Image: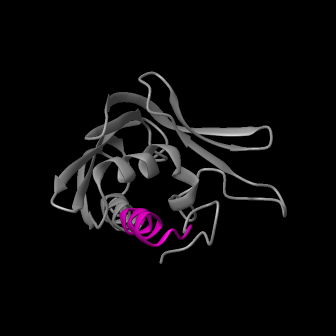
Amino acid sequence: MELRHMDVTARVSIAAPRERVWQALTGDVAAWWGAPYLLIDDHPAGEVLSLVAEPRVGTPVLETLGDRQAMWGVVNIVAPPSEFGWVGQMGMGGATNGEVRFTLEADGDTTLVTVRHRAIGYFGDAMETSYDYGWNDLLHRLSAHVVEGRNYGAAGLNRAP
């Protein structure tokens, strides 16, 4: 494998004010983020997986299931209600590092949410396509959670809307 660069951008317009979208993005993570985008993927019946992305620089973006934990990265930017991001492996494994940055822009009664994921490391050809699809799916789950109040993540249906 060779050293590669990845730059994925996904966007969604959500019919809600930025403050509500910010709260879901940073406070209700398990409501919209779930399978197949999890690091801990074998859940015993009845155990609840939690996902936390606390908006405070230096805190981990973390999955927890019982005594098990897996970290996506470490928060490196918090600017409510417009920017939130973290740095780390983002589930890419191996000698890989990157940054995920969400921006929330007010547009009348809606919020334009953009996520940009940049990474460098040793990963296969399909990685960029996979993350492009995944970020688009997760943003649509976020939108459905904010607008409809439905949980499409680990704390709910755990599938795309």
The spot of residue 123 in percent (x, y) is 38, 50
**What colour scheme governs how the chains and residues are painted in the rendered image of this protein?**
one colour
Residue 146 drawn in magenta: yes
Please give the name of the residue rendered at 42% of the width and 30% of the height, measured from the top-left corner: 75
Residue nearest the viewer, comparing 125 with 1: 125
Q: Can residue 9 be seen in this snapshot?
A: no
- Residue 61 relative to residue 140: left or right: right
Rendered position, 143 above or below 6:
below
Rendered position, 43 above or below 26:
below
- Residue 99 relative to residue 160: left or right: left
The spot of residue 154 in percent (x, y) is 62, 60
Please give the name of the residue rendered at 54% of the width and 69% of the height, measured from the top-left corner: 152
Which stretch is magenta? Answer: 138-151
Residue 15 placement: quadrant: bottom left
Please give the name of the residue rendered at 38% of the width and 69% of the height, measured from the top-left corner: 140
- Residue 66 relative to residue 159: left or right: right
Rendered position, 106 above or below 70:
below
- Residue 80 relative to residue 62: left or right: left
Count of marks placed on residues = 0
Residue 161 drawn in magenta: no
The spot of residue 96 in percent (x, y) is 39, 38
The spot of residue 98 in percent (x, y) is 33, 37
Q: Can residue 36 be seen in this snapshot?
A: yes
Residue nearest the viewer, comparing 135 with 90: 135
Residue nearest the viewer, comparing 59 with 15: 15
